[in-house]
Amino acid sequence: MINSASMLGVYRRAYGECPRGVIVSMAPGRVNIIGEHTDYNDGFVLPTPIDRRIWIAAKPQGGMNVSLYAADYNERTSFQIGGIEFDEGHPWANYVIGVADAMAKRGHALGGANMAIKGDVPIGAGLSSSAAIEVAAAKAFARLFNLDINPVELAYIGKSAENDFVGVRCGVMDQFVGSLGRSGHALFIDCRTNQYEHIPLDPDYRFVVVNTMVKRELTSSAYNERRRQCEEGVRALRKRLPDVVALRDISGEDLERHRLDLPDVVYRRCRHVVAENRRVLEAVDALKRGDIESLGRLLYESHLSLRDDYEVSCRELDTLVEMARRIPGAIGARMTGAGFGGCTVNIVEKEHANEFNEKIMEGYRAATGISAESYMS
């Protein structure tokens, strides 16, 4: 188990010095209950943090050199504040380097440090390990150098690192929940206004996350292509609807009225986003009313939309969702994350959660030959 005390030991072994004066920061991974590919369209999302985290133990040093040690890879590298460059040999380090770059560009004064990094957020599973390390790094730099940075700015620093340094054109959802998420609550986020609300989750149900073990690499996937298609749709629709800034501003009726102005593939991308924004608002209402059955129905609808309109699912994800429909106690399921692999999120009655977990693991192994992993939230 990783915690603050164990991270002091990680730091001591990495740098061979007493951990006196070492600070420890942490940020969780997340599972998105509903609201996929809506954040970069100024829309709505509903994630919740999971019990998997990235931890950083750090201590200030003289000069401008930042040393990094990744315990999970047993790798070391370093970079210079004021002379920041992309680290081709250590891809994991660029999430920290990008954060330092974003903070420096915002006028925050950084200096040298030693950092030891360890975590248990699965890499490439769609549970936002990249945002977790970005937020943990931003928190660490802020504490090391006494910087007054609020949680929303921390999230945007992480987003800037991923967009401008790593090269993934993600929205702000993942970093937002890493910075502001609360255990046992969903975090409803308006990605245009940054308004957010913590919504209690029903304790009689569990969110079971199942990892297909199919890895996806966002920077080499169709993720950025999907974003460009959404932007193409906005440009075309703005000719008819001048007040449109993003797909957030389009109603389903408006989209259908002007669908012939769009190439079919762009229309289908837009249809997913427009409908998904509506589903998020309905999901928030369902949670507040305690209507878990309606929430489950919305998850199934979201998956079909992601599979057919946004085309970011895969055989393994579809297999898991169809299996969930047949297991007692399962209320809803869908792929979660950017897609092309990663995980499904399943709403399961608490009393059936262990049975559900066993059955879906066995069924998935029989259907695919792959041993999945699962996590509970």
Image (cartoon, rainbow, N blue to C red):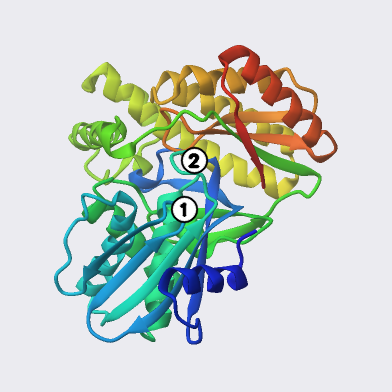
Assign a secondary structure to mark 1.
Answer: loop
- Badge 2 is on which residue? 35
Residue 273 location, x and y as percent? 40, 34
Name the amino acid type tagged 2.
Gly
Residue 135 location, x and y as percent? 42, 63
335 on left or right of 124: right
Q: Nearer the viewer, residue 146 or 226?
A: 146
Residue sitting at x 43%, y 39%: 124
Residue sitting at x 73%, y 38%: 292
- Badge 1 is on which residue? 72
Name the amino acid type tagged 1.
Asp
Assign a secondary structure to mark 2.
Answer: loop
Residue 80, located in which quarter of the rendered image?
bottom left
Specify the label residue 276 is tagged with.
none
* In the rendered image, the vertical position of residue 125 relative to residue 107, given as above or below: above
Residue 82 location, x and y as percent? 16, 74
Q: Nearer the viewer, residue 192 or 25?
A: 25
